[in-house]
Amino acid sequence: MESETFVPVVSVAELREGFLTTHVVEGRPLIVATTAEGLHVYDATCPHADFQFSAARLRRGCEIECQMHGARFKADAGGEVIKGPAKEPLWTLESRVVDGSLEVLLDW
């Protein structure tokens, strides 16, 4: 069985509830949504039109909105689609917090 490799993304102290931040890990752009329910890490590309998300305030504290066509995703529920035109959810990345640092599983 292959061992899991987690790499650091950002210090949890730098994150604020209700905001979306962007980060690049191993050349891949990621977004971190910080909601009342916790930290959620997704691929930074909208599945509708391959548009890159940017840092922003979350709508209603828990919705990620694509600036290109207005698709919305539930930040604290696995990136599920709330409003089209997107039909597919955001690609979720496995993450954990270790010693105050948010880490993501390298599986790509």
Image (cartoon, grey):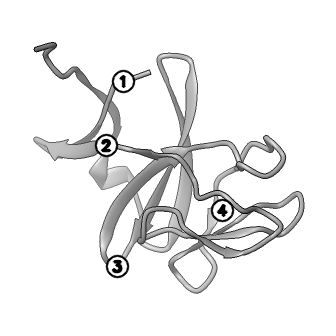
Determine contact: label 4, label 3, CB under 8 Å: no
Relative horizontal placement of residue 40, taking residue 88 as reference (left or right): left
Tell me the amino acid under the disc marked 3: Ala
Residue 78's tag is none
Pointer 1: residues within 10 angstroms few (<14), some, or many (20+)? few
Residue 83, x across and y down, in percent: 73, 77
Q: Earlier in the sequence, mark 1 or mark 2?
A: 2
Determine contact: label 2, label 3, CB under 8 Å: no
Q: Earlier in the sequence, mark 3 or mark 1?
A: 3
Q: Nearer the viewer, mark 2 or mark 3?
A: 2
| Alpha carbon separation for disc pair 2 and 3 | 18 Å
Tell me the quarter of the picture where residue 86 sits. bottom right
Determine contact: label 1, label 2, CB under 8 Å: yes
Q: Earlier in the sequence, mark 4 or mark 3?
A: 3
* SS for dot 2: loop
| Alpha carbon separation for disc pair 1 and 2 | 9 Å
Relative horizontal placement of residue 29, taking residue 48 as reference (left or right): left
Residue 71, x across and y down, in percent: 77, 68
Residue 36's tag is 3
Residue 107's tag is 1
* SS for dot 4: strand
Tell me which residue sits at (29%, 53%) in the image: 13
Q: Which residue is mark 4?
A: 56
Tell me which residue sits at (78%, 71%) in the image: 84
Tell me the amino acid under the disc marked 1: Asp
| Alpha carbon separation for disc pair 2 and 4 | 22 Å
| Alpha carbon separation for disc pair 3 and 1 | 27 Å
| Alpha carbon separation for disc pair 1 and 4 | 26 Å
Tell me the amino acid under the disc marked 2: Glu
Tell me the quarter of the picture where residue 88 sits. bottom right
Q: Which residue is mark 2?
A: 94
